[in-house]
Structure formats: structure tokens, C-alpha cells
Image (tube, rainbow, N blue to C red):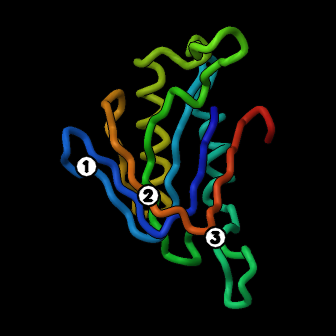
Amino acid sequence: MRFLIQRVKEASVKVDNEVIGAIDHGLLIFVGICEGDNEQIADKLIKKLIGLRIFTDSEGKTNISLADVGGSLLIVSQFTLYADCKKGNRPSFTKAAPPDMAEKLYEYIISRCKEHAEVSTGSFGADMKVSLVNDGPFTILLDDKEL
């Protein structure tokens, strides 16, 4: 499982030209789910995500968490985080989980994150247009294989 985290001043997601999710100050999370992922892996990444001290304190140091700044989460599914570009020029997505499994875990992640912060979401499987103002820029990739 992978979470691509971007600290944002604002972010939104549109489907068919309609905003379906938006946040102000907080984190935009792109979620990639692969075969073999499960709720225990999701819990491990969520715990790390919620505890990340990546917001600046009064001294300008990245030393405080999402909860400390009252930030929100915008969670967007993104199977392309498991693109394999080793052969040729067309990415392969065979490492990504099947849609039914991925959607269940995506919904689980959303429900668990709602225990910690205000959450907005994209629409699983939809053609989404994501807009953001990255704060920093500040982008982190959490991969369960590296935790």
C-alpha cells in the first residue's frame, strides 16, 4: 500500500466538472492499493499518516501534526501509484489490486481517517480532476514495504 501525501493550502477534486471533495489547509492523500494489502497494513499507514509532524511550528520547523493545526484530509484513490515502467514505454498496472478489493480497502481507510480528522474524498474509479496548492512544496511517499 502506498500513500502519496502532499501538504496543501487547499485541494479539490472534480468529477464531470462538479466539485465532489475539497479541503483548505491539510493533506491531500493519493492512495494506491496492491494485491495482498489488507486492513492491518492500512492501519499501520494511517497511524503513521496521522502522526506525521510535517506542519511548521512557530519557529518555522516541521514539528507539528495534522491534529495540531486542525487540518483536513482529501483522500483520492490512485491505482497508478503501482505503475510498472520497467519494460517499454507503456506502464503496466498489474501490481494494482483488483477494483473490488481496492474499493473496500479505500472505504476502510476513509472510515478510519474520519476518526482523526475531517475527511473529503474523490470518487473511486471515476475520471477525476484534482487541483491543489502544494504548501512548500511538501510531498512524502509512504510505502508499507518501507515502514
The numbered dot on residue 132 is 2
Badge 1 element: strand
N-terminal of the pair, mark 2 or mark 3, is 3
Outermost bottom residue: 58
Disc number lying in front (1 or 2): 2
- Vertical order, 144 against 68 (above or below): above
Residue nearer the viewer, 106 or 62: 62
Q: Position of residue 46 (x, y in %)?
A: 60, 48
Q: Residue at x 28, y 46 (%)?
A: 14
N-terminal of the pair, mark 3 or mark 1, is 1
- Vertical order, 90 against 147 (above or below): above
User: Which residue was labeled with disc 3?
Assistant: 65
User: Which residue was labeled with disc 1?
Assistant: 20
Q: Would you call the spot at circle 2 few (<14 residues within 10 Å), some (14-19), or many (20 or more)?
A: some
Q: Would you call the spot at circle 1 few (<14 residues within 10 Å), some (14-19), or many (20 or more)?
A: some
Q: Position of residue 113 (x, y in %)?
A: 49, 52
Disc number lying in front (2 or 3): 2
Q: Is residue 58 left or right of residue 9?
A: right
Q: Is residue 5 left or right of residue 11?
A: right
Q: Residue at x 62, y 14 (%)?
A: 89
> The disc labelled 3 sits on which kind of residue?
Ser
- Vertical order, 61 against 22 (above or below): below
- Vertical order, 37 against 4 (above or below): above
> The disc labelled 1 sits on which kind of residue?
Ile
> The disc labelled 2 sits on which kind of residue?
Leu
Mark 2 vs 3: CB contact within 8 A: no
Q: Residue at x 65, y 34 (%)?
A: 41
Disc number lying in front (3 or 1): 1
Q: What is the spatial separation of the Cα atoms under label 1 and label 2, in whole angstroms? A: 14 Å
